[in-house]
Image (cartoon, grey):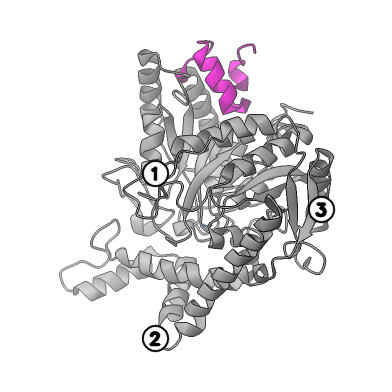
Amino acid sequence: MSAPERSDLTTTSAADLARALKARELSSVEVTRAYLDRIAAEDGRLGSYLHVDADAALARAEEIDAAGSAGDGLAGIPVALKDVVVTEGVPTTSGSKILEGWRPPYDATVAARLKAAGTVLLGKTNMDEFAMGSSTENSAYGVTRNPWDPERIPGGSSGGSSAAVAGGLAPWAIGTDTGGSIRQPAALTGLVGHKPTYGSVSRYGLIAFSSSLDQAGPMARTVLDAALLHEAIAGHDPLDSTSIDSPVPVLAECARRGADGDLSGLKVGVVRELGGEGHRDGYEQGVLDRFAEAVALLEGMGAEVREVSCPAFDLALPAYYLIAPSEASSNLARFDGVRYGLRVGDDGDRDLDEVMALTREQGFGPEVKRRIILGTYALSSGYYEAYYGQAQKVRTLISRDFSAGFADVDVLVSPTTPTVAFPLGSRVDDPVAMYAADLCTLPASLAGVPAISVPCGLSDGLPVGFQIMAPALADDRCYQVAAALEAASGGPLIDRLTGAAP
Ligand code: GLN
């Protein structure tokens, strides 16, 4: 490979950047500067970052170059982190006013691992407040726009990360996914996004939304890049009590193998309840068409395809919107105006309860308040069994549907989202329409199984995502099948936006 041109750096895959860094064709400072220049030129329009420290990024890149380690693994490659990831000394808000100005005294394990790997932090990306949302319109700091069409949403809640990567403002980024917040924004911006097996990536230092669902994962331009970033953050962490003590998965190798395009022997189940016969309400025809074409591509590579029914998936949405708010109402109790960030009304005349109430009233946005009220209600005595208890039963049924499905097939597939990216503002006054954006991603979240979104073409010029779900700890299967699909569909879709492909 010849050295990428300076002007091409922000359209080059991270894997290729690593090769060029290793060969000393490029320095980390050159790569970092290219991204910082593009952020300076473009982010006023896109709004993907909440915080960028150009001097710190360049100083870090210089340090990596001076140490001669650029290109060793991820060393010297810039990265962006969703603002839900706690970073030592670097402002972290989780998209909320209530944390404005907070500089955490420690690093999340995900941030620490990326630092130890020698990556260069470009900045923190915008997100729906406390990761509650599907469009990034719930951020207290303004909206983020979709690089494919600036009048449309970039997905959410990791919409700052998706817009940054799709717009060439970061080579890759970390997102978090509680009900779909990595996969949905990846799908709507033509990227690859993977939600790891619950417990396989540390939650230590992620600002908690719904602790039994939250997972951090990679968002990238290519399947191989996502695998490389995922490997760097995975693995057991004693600081997270739900962390699984298993070896770091081998993913990049699976992605490379998958690109060979041989899927013979692989059994693929198409989930009827996610866009199949009798379950197409709310799905756009263009999404269903691209999905069907992708399934045909898998078949063409030797996969054996059949339909699988998962009846409890129909109940995933109501179950999720009881469980996630319930856990959120408990997790968000820590924002009391005393320990972190904002404090309102502390003028000496008010008692602690009043200060706390004023702080929470002014510090939280409307969607966060809605979730706290919903969750508190679902957990209250007299209603607990009818709401939270029932939702937990549905969660068990969904896990059983997955187990039954995986007894017959190796992976389950569906569209990632029912529609392409919708126009800014079109769903803000209709929470239920907003929640429907997560229809396809919620089952894997509730069951804790891994799921990837990989692009499968365009509908009306906008990206469509293909979701591949696998049994717990079989994340490698997601990458293998995604890589095969990426190769068979003419390479990374994002290259069509950047002009790097026809
Ligand atoms: N959109 C979903 C919600 O609003 C999922 C969010 C997420 O995965 N963080 O809860």
Please, what is the three-letter code of the amino acid marked with disc 2? Ser
Q: Secondary structure at mark 2?
A: loop
**Residue 48 visible from this viewpoint:** no
Judging depth in this view, the residue of 422 and 265 nearest the camera is 265
What's the magenta region?
A: 1-28
Q: Relative to residue 434, is residue 32 depicted above or below?
A: above
Residue at mark 2: 381
Q: Is residue 335 left or right of residue 311?
A: left
Label placed on residue 286: 3
Q: Quadrant of residue 402?
A: bottom right
Residue sitting at the far bottom: 382
Q: Quadrant of residue 361?
A: bottom left
Residue at mark 1: 236
Image point 35% across, 59% down: which residue?
A: 98
The disc, 3 or 1, on the residue closer to the chain's N-terminal end is 1
Is residue 113 a member of the stretch shown in magenta? no
Measured Cα–Cα span from mark 3 to mark 1? 41 Å
